[in-house]
Image: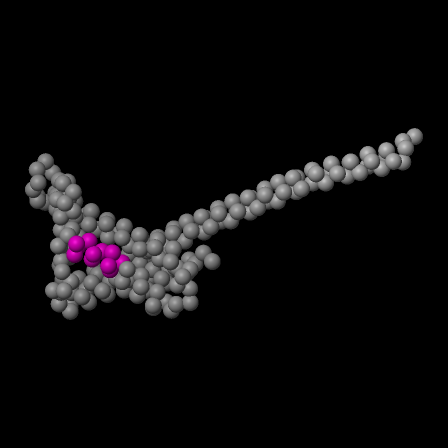
Amino acid sequence: MVPEAEFGSSYGRGKDRVRALRPAWSGDRQRSTTCAFTDSATRSGQNGRMHRILTGMAAGAAGTTALNVVGYLDMAVRARPASDTPAETVRRSERLLGITRSGEDRDDDDVEHRRSAIGALLGVGSGLGVGALYGLAAPKLDGAPLIARGIIAGLTANIGTTAPMVALGVTDPRTWPISSWLSDLAPHLAYGIVTAATWDLMDPK
């Protein structure tokens, strides 16, 4: 039979050991739960950001289609020739970077056709890029009217395509007549409004 004093002492030491172990085990579990929650929140935030980028690019593709439709309608109605500024922008970029499109630095038809195609592809890329930016900025634009968001997106696209041309000396908007301003702004505003409207239809919220 164990003496009462010895039993009480053993029991007390056992309780002390349990108390000594409990905080470490409890703290580890708490830290593990916190880390898991943080990792899950980080992954969720990254997935949400990527979703907004991809949805914005899809909206930008729709906006780019609208931009091309309005531009070609203007060309058909006014018998206006296609602009050569995208191809000229590519040509000046090549010279700036020391790139040539043929065995020698000449401007034959094949080279010009390639430049024209590259210029058009850069325009499409710009439309997709602005759409991706719109997707990232969309949470901050919540509550703004569709027209206002469309104008912001359209002007951003306009600046994104015109700024490189101005920087390379291809064009100077200060010398444009009113008709040229309208021909440039109308397609970009169509881009912005269609991009914003398409985003609303595909809103990932």
State whether the magenta stretch is mostly helix, strand or loop.
Answer: helix
Q: Residue 115 colored magenta? A: no
How far across and how far down the image is residue 28, in percent?
62, 40
Q: How many marks?
A: 0
Q: Using the image as rendered, state which of residue 117 and residue 145 is in the foreground.
A: 145
How far across and how far down the image is residue 199, in percent?
39, 59
Colour basis: one colour
Question: Which residue is situated farthest in the right direction here?
Answer: 1
Q: Using the image as rendered, state which of residue 11 and residue 104 is in the foreground.
A: 11
**Residue at coordinates 27% horizontally, 50% vertically from top-left?**
125
Question: Which residue is situated farthest in the top direction here?
Answer: 1
How far across and how far down the image is residue 106, in percent?
7, 42
How far across and how far down the image is residue 82, in percent?
15, 57
Q: Residue 165 colored magenta? A: yes
**Residue at coordinates 85% horizontally, 37% vertically from top-left?**
8
Question: Which residue is situated farthest in the front direction here?
Answer: 5
Determine if residue 69 is in view. Answer: no
Rendered-image quadrant of the N terminus: top right
Q: Which residues are magenta?
A: 157-167
**Residue at coordinates 30% horizontally, 65% vertically from top-left?**
151
Q: Is residue 143 left or right of residue 91?
A: right
**Residue at coordinates 28% horizontally, 54% vertically from top-left?**
127
Q: Is residue 95 left or right of residue 144?
A: left
